[in-house]
Image (cartoon, rainbow, N blue to C red):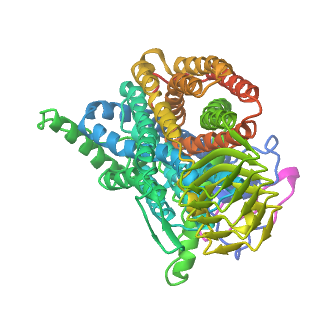
Amino acid sequence: MDDPYQNNINQQGETYPTYGEGGEYTYPYKTDYPPQEEEDAASDVTEGHDDDDQMYEGEYQGIPHPDEIKEARRAARREARMKARMAAEVEEETLPDQYESIMEDCGHGRFQWTLFTVLGLALMADGVECFVVSFALPSAEKDMCLSNADKGMLGLLVYVGMMIGAVLWGGLADKLGRRQCLLYALAINCIFSFLSCFAQSYGFFIFFRLGSGIGIGGSIPVVYTYYAEFLQMDKRGEHLSWLCLFWMLGGLYASFTAWGIIPHYGWGFSMGTEFQFHSWRVFVLVCFLPSVAALAGLVFMPESPRFLLETARHDEAWMILKQVHDTNWRAKGEPERVFQVSQIKMPQAQDDEFIEIQSETGTAFQRFMVRHMTLVKQVMKNLMSLAAPDLRLHGLFIAIVWFTMAFSYYGLGAWFPDQIKYLQFEEYESNVKIFHREKVERFHFNFTLQNQVHKEGEYIHDRFIDIEIRNVKFEESLFENCYFEDVRSTDTFFENCTLKNTVFYNTDLWEDSKFINCKLENTTFLHPKKGCHLNFQEQNDILIYLVSFLGSLSVLPGNIIAGLLMDKIGRLKIIGGSMLGSAGCTFFLLLCFSQWAVVFFQCLFFAASAAAWNGIEVITVELYPASKRATAFGVLNGTCKLAAIISTFTFGKVIGITKIIPIILSFSALVCGGLLAFKLPETREVILQ
């Protein structure tokens, strides 16, 4: 008799009943039941039975249990996945090492110096942008009739544009490429800067300057990221510091050109009263030339190979690295040296998140929208990844360092010229001449009247022809049978005066604004000149250009020291020491009681703080991985511009009131930032991730 625990199948395929649990027969096999696989059939037979009471029927025949087979398969799959992850991790970890070795093999030579010059011009354009409005504003405010509120808004919107541009282009550079985004940014800056030269109204001018700021705002985050990825570890700190010299050159260029162009009032033309192109517009036109030069040079530069490797474009990256290698060694007299890298390790390729609508199912506009909306999502995702646990703390620390440094630097940078103007005004007011009850008859005024107050005077049959009247006030005076012709005035007013039988011909003294509570009897205004552009050439103080020139030049020693010591003593000592030294310099501002004292302490402060800027920019590049480097730099540089907006607005409100507030705020910010800088990780001998 056969074993009742075995399934017995006869030759005709019929199934005999088996002996089940409890001694009961199970239902016979139904011939219309679909056939099962061996594994599934075995599972069905034992389904619902207790494994402890029911013995597997194939145990004595050496057949593995189906559950054991499934578990073995699952274990094999787990092991395969584990090996794949480990392989990906190993490859990701070795890519920075291999890339560093490749850059060492390529050497540092002609290619890096060429790129250094091109990117330096882009950085120089950013430095120029920070000075354009402040230099042009004294003339532009008269040309476009700007109020104090308009002037303040114009200065702030430049920084707003640069803040937006830093975040925008920094985020896009990690997705579209460093070179491509820098090309776009510089092109936008060139276009809007050029258009702003011809804008006649305040609305158009402020719009074009905002667009120009958005364009140039991308230069700093993209330039440093781009250049750092062509440098080997032992050259990185030094040469990124030398790159900062171009920002100083931008300030010198703006100061020198403003000094040489704006006071030459004949360097312009006009077409009636509707279109004016004065010398300050020539200055604005000249200021966008560094951006044009950088744009032209960048056309011939390649994309960053590190970015190409991040986007799985290894063939392009290999060709560019070979170009760098051959260019450098050919210039060194070794053209026979061969680029020996055949394979480049890459991070695990990421799935392309772009969704393309097929041409037969979607319009060109739909495909355009899908591409760009997906790009926006990718940028936002990369932006949010900066808050990851491994980046969060250091990111917060370096953001505070950026903010405190910018708050003090830009705030005091705007405070110094304003303080000089205030001291000039005080000195000017102290020398005002007061004339009381003077009586002048039949006199021909053919000389400039300046900084005077005339009270209760009498002017009878006098002639004022082809003269300038600056900061003059007539109070309770009598003008009888007087004649004014071709008179140009600045801050000149008639208050509570009486004018009888007086003629104003071709002057900018008109009834609506220059005469306050005056009594006009038989007074005629013929061909009046109305418009702020009439006295645009006033208030262009040469000292302000000289101050900015000296302030920009004073950062040269700090840049040189940072370049020489960055790789020797480390980034943290450079940043912390420079910020604490700058904090000490702020206390000397209490001694600023003259214009030249302000100039001296401005130069001292800028010289002390220059090294900190170099260190902050270098450590920002080195602290973040390649896939987030430009995005993080853009966010931090945007934080810097936000601090500039807050500080310039705050410090501007206390000009002429007190010096204590700017000094205390600057000192506190620099001390906090300098001490916190020592909590950052030292990246001097760290390979770019």
Query: Total of numbered circles in the picture?
Result: 0
Is residue 493 found inside the magenta-colored segment of the image?
no
State the predominant SS element of the stretch in magenta.
Answer: loop
Q: Is residue 239 left or right of residue 449?
A: left
Give the residue displayed 67% in from the left and 31% down from the top: 400
Q: In this rendering, would 23 be left or right of 419?
A: right
Judge whether 99 appears above or below 295 on screen: above
Magenta span includes 8: yes
Residue 482 is situated, as x and y percent measured from the top left of the image, at 66, 64
Q: Residue at x 62, y 39 (%)?
A: 640
Closer to us: 407 or 83: 407
Q: Pinpoint residue 540: horizontal percent, then vertical percent.
A: 53, 47
**Image location of residue 5, percent across then percent down:** 73, 50
Quadrant of the image occupied by residue 464: bottom right
Does residue 4 appear in the picture of this structure?
A: no
Q: Which residues are magenta?
A: 1-27
Q: Position of residue 596 (x, y in %)?
A: 55, 26
Quadrant of residue 295 within the rendered picture: bottom left
Camera-side residue of 157 and 513: 513
**Residue located farthest toward the bottom when viewing the structure as drawn:** 360
Can residue 551 be seen here? The reply is yes
The outermost residue toward the front is: 441
Residue at image point 54% right, 23% down: 600
Q: As displayed, is residue 428 above or below residue 522? A: above
Near-viewer residue (124 or 323): 124
Q: Nearer the viewer, residue 370 or 41?
A: 370
In the depicted structure, whether residue 293 falls above or below residue 103: below
Q: Residue at x 41, y 50 (%)?
A: 261
